[in-house]
Each structure stands twice: as structure tokens, then as C-alpha cells.
Image (spheres, helix red, strand yellow):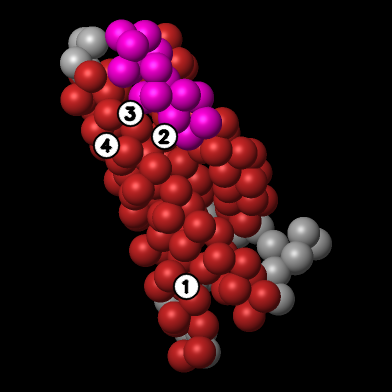
Amino acid sequence: MSMLAAIRPDDWNFPLFLHVLGAMILVGGVLTGATALALARGSANMLRTGYYSLLAVALPGFILMRVGAAWIADKEGVDDENSGAWVGIGFIVADPGGLLLVISLVLGGAGVYRLRNGKGTRLLKATMVISVVLLVAYLVAVWAMTAKPDA
């Protein structure tokens, strides 16, 4: 027999809401940034828009997602021994993904600064490539969180 629904205590709802909200903001920011960088075709305004989407939307979304994840994991008492594969996938994507996001922001920041001199497009192209990799990884994590494989 399969479980139709899981009931959780009401005090878990707010941290879970923050986690999901942060994840949605993060994925939206990375999608917007990667798309703007990919479609810029040398346009300085589009390159800046893509970078600032990552900086102003994706980074705060990541922080909110990660804080919410740590809070709900603490409330649920999640550890490596009794959690499903979906929790492991989430941690595997979140922590290195945050590092990649920071690396892409540093590269993109240098690229945006160099745009004043007509340079920096290679750095922003690297930011775009990292953003696409992050987007794929975050979509895998979203799938894992919703489908809960090997729960």
C-alpha cells in the first residue's frame, strides 16, 4: 500500500515554505541570468542584466533556500542514516552549487567591470556556462525534492 499523504507538524511549515520559496527564486534567477547572458550577443546591457540577475536574484534565493533547508533539516532531525536519496541529492547539489554560484559571480563581476573598456565578454561567457551547469543541477535537485526517488 502506498502512502497518500504525509502529515507534518504545523511548526515545520514556515521553514519548509522558506526553503521552497528560496529554491524557486534561485532557479528563476539562474534561468534569467543564463538566458540573458546567452542571448546578449555582445550587447553590454544584456550582459549586465544577466550578471545582475545572478547577483540580485539568484544569490539571495540561494541564501534563503539554504537557510530554509538547514532549518527544516534540523526540525525534522534529518541525518545521512535515515534520510532518502532525495535529501542526499539536495545536499550534493546545494553546497557545490553555492560555490559555483559564487565563482560565477566573481568572474561575472570582473567581466562587467571590464566591459567599460570593451573587454570582459569571455569572463561573462564563463559565467553563462557555469550558470547553465547550475541550472541543470538545480533542476535535478527540484526533481529529486518533488519525486523523492528511493524515499
- Residue with the most extreme bottom position: 10
| Residue under pointer 3 | 34
* Mark closer to the chain start, 3 or 2: 3
Q: Which mark is residue 32?
A: 4
Name the amino acid, label 1.
Leu
Q: Quadrant of residue 37?
A: top left
Residue at label 2? 135
Q: Is 136 on the left or on the right of 94, as rendered?
A: left
Which of disc 1 and disc 4 is earlier in sequence? 1
Horizontal and vertical percent position of residue 96: 63, 39
- The kind of residue tagged 2 is Leu
**C-alpha span from label 3 to label 4:** 6 Å
Determine whether label 3 and label 2 are within 8 Å by CB.
Answer: yes
| Residue bearing mark 1 | 16
Q: Secondary structure at mark 4?
A: helix
Q: Secondary structure at mark 3?
A: helix
Q: Residue furthest right?
A: 81
Would you say the magenta stretch is mainly helix, strand or loop?
Answer: helix
Q: Find residue 71 and report its image quarter.
A: bottom right
Q: Are marks 3 and 4 in contact (CB under 8 Å)?
A: yes
